[in-house]
Amino acid sequence: MSEFLQSPWYAWLVLPLLIFLARIVDVSIATLRFMFIARGARWQAVIAGFFEALIWLIMISQIIQNLHNFMCFVAYAGGFAAGSYIGMRFEERLALGLVLMRVITQKPATDLVNDLREHSFGVTQVDAEGSRGPVCVLFMVMKRSRIKAAVARVMQFNPKAFYTIEDVRHVNQGVFQLPADGSVTGFNALARWRTRLK
């Protein structure tokens, strides 16, 4: 085993590959840790930070022992780039937390609001005045995993609607998921539902 660890194959191929893979895992965990911090998920962020630091220390110790091997530096940089991409993909797949979607439309929004409620979205409608006249502003707090469905409903009724999506760290009361039949019982029906992102 010691002969293999001292062989050129290990130094120039196996070790850089291990550093590359470790860096991917390290950066992916770091991306998730930032996401947990932004969502207020404390314990998840602490656990992710522990493993991120542990992997980084092991990896750096190997690089320091092989400063003459430029392939280790290439693997380190390549793993950072790949890990950044993979970490973002993980975040998209996990779709953790809640978001606030704000929709501004110049068209009457009655049909759109009814359709959103029929598809289990809680919607708050506000009449407002835009730069070109009266507009309707819709507010929806939803799970991140439902963003695509909400955007699709909005685009179907008004392809020119303006919308923004923001992260929500904490919520207290509100309608986040309506019954499948689309019936609306009001905010009081879910007043006891307190959601805390963890």
Image (cartoon, helix red, strand yellow):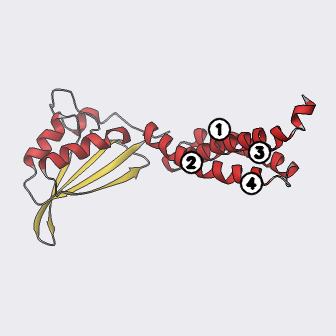
Q: Which of 55 and 73 is in front in this view?
A: 73
Circle 1/circle 3 CB separation < 8 Å: no
Q: Which amino acid does label 2 sit on?
A: Thr
Q: Which of 185 and 142 is in front in this view?
A: 142
Circle on res. 73: 4
* Alpha-carbon span between mark 2 and mark 1: 13 Å
Circle 2/circle 1 CB separation < 8 Å: no
Q: Does residue 38 lie above or below 41 as drawn?
A: below
Q: Name the residue under label 2.
A: 31
Observer-side mark, 3 or 4, equals: 4
Residue 173 lies in quadrant: top left
**Of callouts 3 and 2, the N-terminal one:** 2
Circle on res. 47: 1
Observer-side mark, 3 or 2, equals: 3
Residue 45 image position (x, y, % from top left): 60, 43
Q: Residue furthest bottom?
A: 131
Q: What residue type is labelled 1?
A: Ile
Residue 179 image position (x, y, % from top left): 21, 28
Circle 3/circle 4 CB separation < 8 Å: no
Q: Nearer the viewer, residue 99 or 40?
A: 99
Observer-side mark, 1 or 3, equals: 3
